[in-house]
Amino acid sequence: MAKTFLLDVEGVSTRIRRQYQNQHRDWLAGNSHWPLSIPLGIPSEQQAERDLSAVKKWVVAWQNWQGIGELVWTTRRWRKLGQQDLPEKLLLQTPDQAASWIGEKTRWQTAHNRYCAFVERWPALANHLPRYFPVLADVLDSDIQKLTAVLSWLQANPDRQLYIRQLPIKGVDTKWLGNHKKLISELLACLHALESEPGDFYAITGIRREPTRIRMRILDDSLRKLCGGLGDITAPVDELKNLNLPVKRIYIVENIQTGLAFNDIPGSVVIMGLGYSVDLLAQIPWVKQSQGFYWGDIDTHGFAILGRAKASLPHITSILMDEQTLLMHKSLWVHENKPSKVIDANCLTGDEKEMYKKLLENKWGSQIRLEQERLSWEYVWQCIMG
């Protein structure tokens, strides 16, 4: 019975670990009160009588304990068992002592030292930085040096409008910057006291964004002549806006090779590989004025992209994304690793919504996917031209 309320060394470790996991960020920011008091569970005389041997063992264990912290004892004068000196609580004076108890001393000290260095340089980060405890505790010193150098340069050079590869920051390469965009933008947003769009790396840092490029093939010789004979064009959205081609039909496909396989179709172009950026097409006037067809993979992401396309281009019609096409090509199905559950279904037709729902509910099999480039091209072309 006594074992249920007496806290031994292992039990103390478990409790400290739980508190460390829940509160270490607050400890780092100094938002906590010390010492940390851990009650050890003093039994009543009745409880001690029920399992006297366990209580004696517990007392002896704490008498022999030589660990971190201050063990506080108390005296009980019991009617039957007489005077007893019992361990009452363990006091830990600092987070360092708590971390040491559970084998986290090195990580804690590393995080604390780095936190103090950052806050001394940038006081505005004091309340924000603890959320990045794993970064402070675990990354290499060289990464901290690079982060410090990048924040310092970007703060001193706002809105320089340099491309990321042009940044003259000693020891910092483009790959490192690319891998740490989220961390850099969030810390810099805090330094600039920005409230909106914390995830927009380029807007926050002032680094120049590469222009978004769209690749398309012109499927009509008369239209190609208007572009100096060019048939395969990759250009920024802002430049395509001014092209003003007299296009009648726009085909939007996901796979580049699918777009390359298209034969000529009078008055038509095929646009390839935009993925979830398909809504950029709404910026191009001659695209909005043309009859549009979207053909994507038959999987949840294909319908999520379709929903995004139709939200910005309501006149878009889906093709080759129906149940008949799916079942005709069953031998070519593959597995969709991470189904999309975020979709603008309001813009989909009833049949499109039903297809998405059945895919999500595994109507035909577990997380199936039919990639557009795998379809029989004879069947594809017959549907497109029919």
Image: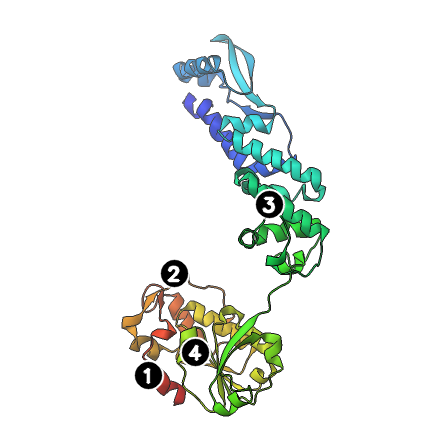
Q: Of callouts 4 and 3, which one flags the residue occurring earlier in the amino acid sequence? A: 3
Q: How far apart are marks 2 and 3 (CA)?
A: 35 Å
| SS state under label 1 | helix
Tell me the mark number nearer the camera, choosing from 4 and 3: 3
Amino acid type at image mark 1: Tyr
Secondary-structure class at tag 4: helix
Please state which amino acid type lies under the numbered disc 4: Gly
Disc 1 to disc 2: CB gap under 8 Å: no
Q: In this view, does 243 lie to the left or right of 47?
A: right
Q: Earlier in the sequence, mark 4 or mark 1?
A: 4
Local packing at callout 2 (Cα closer than 10 Å; few below 14, some 14-19, many 20+) is: few
Q: Can residue 383 be seen in this view?
A: yes
**Circle 2 residue:** 337
Residue located farthest toward the top when viewing the structure as drawn: 82
Left/right of residue 6 with respect to residue 164 in the rendered view: left
**Label ID, residue 146:** 3
Residue picked out by circle 4: 259
**Mark identifier at residue 277:** none
Kindly indicate whether the residue at mark 3 contacts the one at mark 4 (C-beta within 8 angstroms). no
Label 3: which secondary element: helix
Q: Is mark 2 on a helix, strand or loop?
A: loop
Residue name at image x 33 percent, y 81 percent: 377
Give the Cα separation between the discs numbered 4 and 3.
42 Å
Indicate which disc, 4 or 2, sits on the residue closer to the N terminus.
4
- Residue extending farthest to the left is 331
Upstream in sequence: badge 3 or badge 1:
3
Question: Mark 2 or 3 closer to N-term?
Answer: 3
Give 228 or 202, whichever is nearer the viewer.
Answer: 228
Query: Viewer-nearest of labels 1 and 2?
Result: 1
**In this rendering, the label closer to the viewer, 2 or 3:** 3
Q: Where is residue 66 in the image (x, y as percent from the top left)?
A: 49, 15
